[in-house]
Amino acid sequence: MRLENPVIIGLISMITGLTDRESVQKVYRQCWLRGLEILSARGEATVPNPAIISLLEKAEEESHKLG
C-alpha cells in the first residue's frame, strides 16, 4: 500500500475505523472493484489496476494454488 495515495488510505481508515494494513487493503480492493463496476456500467474506458490491486490478486492466486 505504500505505493498508493496516502489520502485514500487515510480516508478508508477514517470512514471504517480500521487501522491495520490488511483490513484497509481489503476495503481498498472492494472500493476499486466497485468503482470499476460503476465505470463499466457507464461505458467509460477501463483503467489499469493500481499496484496494490495487482499484488492482492497475485497473493490470492498463490493462496489458491497452495490450497
Image (cartoon, grey):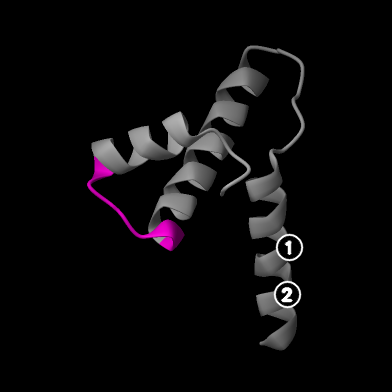
Which residue is at a point 26% across and 36% down the rendered structure image? 15
Give the residue at the far bottom of this rendering.
67
Query: x, y (%) of residue 10?
Result: 37, 37
Q: Is residue 15 above or below residue 45?
A: below
Residue, disc 1: 58
Dot 2: what SS? Answer: helix
Name the side, left or right, on which 2 lies relative to 30: right
Residue tagged by mark 2? 62
Residues tagged 2 and 1 counted as in contact (Cβ below 8 A) = yes
In the displayed structure, 27 sits above or below 34; it is below
From this view, report whether residue 10 is shown above or below residue 2. above
Is 20 in the magenta? yes
Residue 3 or residue 56, whichever sits in front: 3
Q: Is residue 53 magenta?
A: no
Judged left or right of residue 22, residue 41 is right
- Name which residue lies at 64% across and 58% down: 56
Q: Could you tell whether 12 is left or right of 6 in the image? A: left
Expressed as whole percent of the image width and height from the top left, the position of residue 44 reads: 71, 12
Screen quadrant of the C terminus: bottom right
Disc 2 to disc 1, how far (Cα)? 6 Å
Identified at 59% across, 29% down, the residue is 37
Q: Which residues are magenta?
A: 16-22
Amino acid type shown at disc 2: Glu
For label 1, count other residues whose C-alpha is less than 10 Å away and answer few (under 14), some (14-19) or many (20+).
Answer: few
Where's residue 26, x and y in %?
47, 54
Q: Position of residue 63 (x, y in %)?
A: 66, 77
Position of 24 with respect to 44 (left or right) is: left
